[in-house]
Amino acid sequence: MTTDTLTDPPARTAHRRHAPLRHAPAVVAAAIGLLFALPLLWVLAGSLRPGDEVLAGLDELTWRSFVPTHATLDNYATLLQGDFGRAVLNSVGVAAAVIVVGLLLSATAAFALSVFDFPARGAVFAVILLSFMIPFDAIAIPLSATLRDWGLQNTYLGLMLPGIGNGLAIFLLRQFFLAVPRELVEAARMDGLGWWGVFWKIYLPLSRPALIGAGLTLFTFQWQSYMWPLLIGTEPSRQLGPIALSTLQGQLVVDYGQVFAAAAILTLIPLLVLLRLQRYFTQSIAGSGLK
């Protein structure tokens, strides 16, 4: 009888004994994730029920609390045909414009801060870092007064302006641009390519993960903004989704079915976007500028 024959059975027994322990962290993580998902599932289930049935049966939580037995889409149909549907379209349009214009401005600023060596470059970058450390709510009221003086209240431009300049997006892009090899830039310059050509043909194609990550940052800040649209977009035709959601709660009667449906719409749209593009956001933080 060989040595392997003597030692192999106990080793296999120990392996089988410790196998459940290896899966324990995954089971615990799945359980915690399910606990965090339960409120969202309850809201989603409530959005598929009539308003007078949403809060019924909360005294005893069962599987029926999270799975509607008679699901209906009436809440969504009523919402999307009214002012809330227009507010969601406003939110989507403003967020898309902020992403496009904000990415262009952030990318050009990050390019200048990473490529050109000009006086006070460090001071400019420090000011940009401080800009996204200051809570926006602290400057929202005086800033809204300034935009009213400019005649930008109840305009899409007024809703967009604060979201366009985002210091965090500039920071992410600059850190990514710094990792682009200088040899590529020098070779392009020797071939007669101008700085705009270097920016459009070298930096932007190499920085796709960083651009998507910065775009997600701009989208998240704009989509969840509440105080600024409340100060600037006072007309119903210029309201954004979060403001329209708050107006659904009447003083005397609240249709919780419609409130839950509105909350589900405003949650699922960014959730789907983030889940689809989250890997690019991770690459924008950990990437080196080259595939």
Image (cartoon, grey):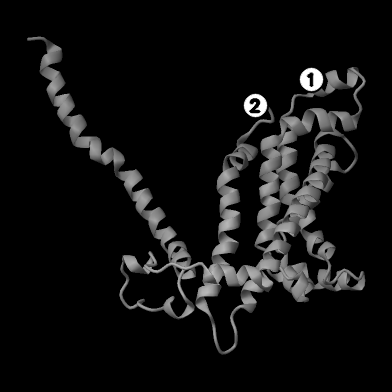
Based on the displayed image, in which of its 4 quarters is residue 141 positioned? bottom right
Q: Nearer the viewer, residue 256 or 274?
A: 256
In the drawing, what numbered circle is on residue 183? Answer: 1
Q: Position of residue 122 (x, y in %)?
A: 82, 43
Q: Observer-nearest residue: 147 or 116?
A: 147
Mark 1 secondary-structure assignment: helix
Residue 126 visible (yes or no) = no
- Mark 1 vs mark 2: in front: 2
Residue 258 spot, x, y in % from top left: 55, 74
Circle number at residue 291: 2
State the count of labels: 2
Q: Position of residue 70 (x, y in %)?
A: 40, 69
The type of residue carrying mark 1 is Glu
Quick one: label 1, few (<14), some, or many (20+) residues within 10 Å?
few
Q: Position of residue 49 (x, y in %)?
A: 45, 72
Tag 2 secondary structure:
loop
Q: State the image quarter where residue 83 is shown.
A: bottom right
Q: Is residue 12 above or below residue 127?
A: above
43 to 289, vertically: above or below: below
Q: Amino acid at mark 2?
A: Lys
Task: Give the residue at x 83% y 32%.
Answer: 200
Task: Residue 239: tell me if it is visible.
Answer: yes
Crowdedness near tag 2: few (<14), some (14–19) or many (≥20) residues, C-alpha within 10 Å: few
From what the image shows, is residue 14 above or below residue 109? Answer: above
Which sits in the foreground, 111 or 47?
Answer: 47
User: Who's the residue at 68% across and 68% down the image?
Assistant: 226
